[in-house]
Image (cartoon, rainbow, N blue to C red):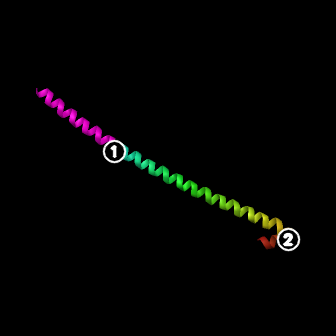
Amino acid sequence: MEVAIVGGIIATITGELATSRIIKESSLLSRVKEDLVWIETEMRRIRSFIRDIWDLAYDVEDIIDTYFPKIRLSRSQWKRLLA
């Protein structure tokens, strides 16, 4: 009888520990999910920023292609202008 009581207590404690462990692990997994969502959001922002930079670079290239050939400067004048 004492063995059954001790076994029951051990089973109850073991069950409570397992339940506690499962709850702790699930909360950690929930945190991981939140972190992954944050990373995904940041990556989208970075991608948008890079697209804006590409657009700006293409605009600058268009301006250079349009206006620089019209400006007649010698090589030394360009060097002084750009320095």
Crowd rating for badge 1 (residues with CA inside 10 Å; few <14, some 14–19, many 20+): few
Q: Main secondary structure of the magenta part?
A: helix
Q: Of residues 83 and 24, which is closer to you in this image?
A: 24
Task: State the residue at coordinates (74%, 61%).
Answer: 58
Name the residue located 22 percent from the left edge and 32 percent from the top edge. Answer: 11
Which residue ends up furthest to the left in the rendered image?
1
CA gap, disc 1 and disc 2: 70 Å
Numbered range of the magenta stretch: 1-24
Residue 35 disc label: none
Residue for badge 2: 76
Tell which circle, 1 or 2, labels the residue nearer the N-terminal end. 1
Q: Amino acid at mark 2?
A: Ser
Q: Regarding mark 2 in the picture, which secondary structure is present there?
A: helix
Eye-nearest disc, 1 or 2: 1
Q: Is residue 4 above or below residue 80?
A: above
Residue type indicated by callout 1: Lys
Q: 10 Å neighbourhood of mark 2: few (<14), some, or many (≥20)?
A: few
From this view, report whether residue 76 is shown above or below residue 46. below
Classify 45 as above or below 20. below
In this view, the residue in front, 10 or 78, is: 10
Percent position of residue 48, x then y: 62, 58
Q: SS for tag 1?
A: helix
Residue at image point 64% right, 58% down: 50
- Residue drawn 45% across the image and 48% down it: 33
Taking depth in this image into account, of 82 and 53 the one nearest to the observer is 53
Q: Is residue 73 left or right of residue 55?
A: right
Reading the image, the residue beneath label 1 is 24
Give the percent coordinates (x, y) of residue 18: 29, 37
Q: Is residue 10 left or right of residue 32?
A: left
Percent of width and height locating residue 1? 10, 26
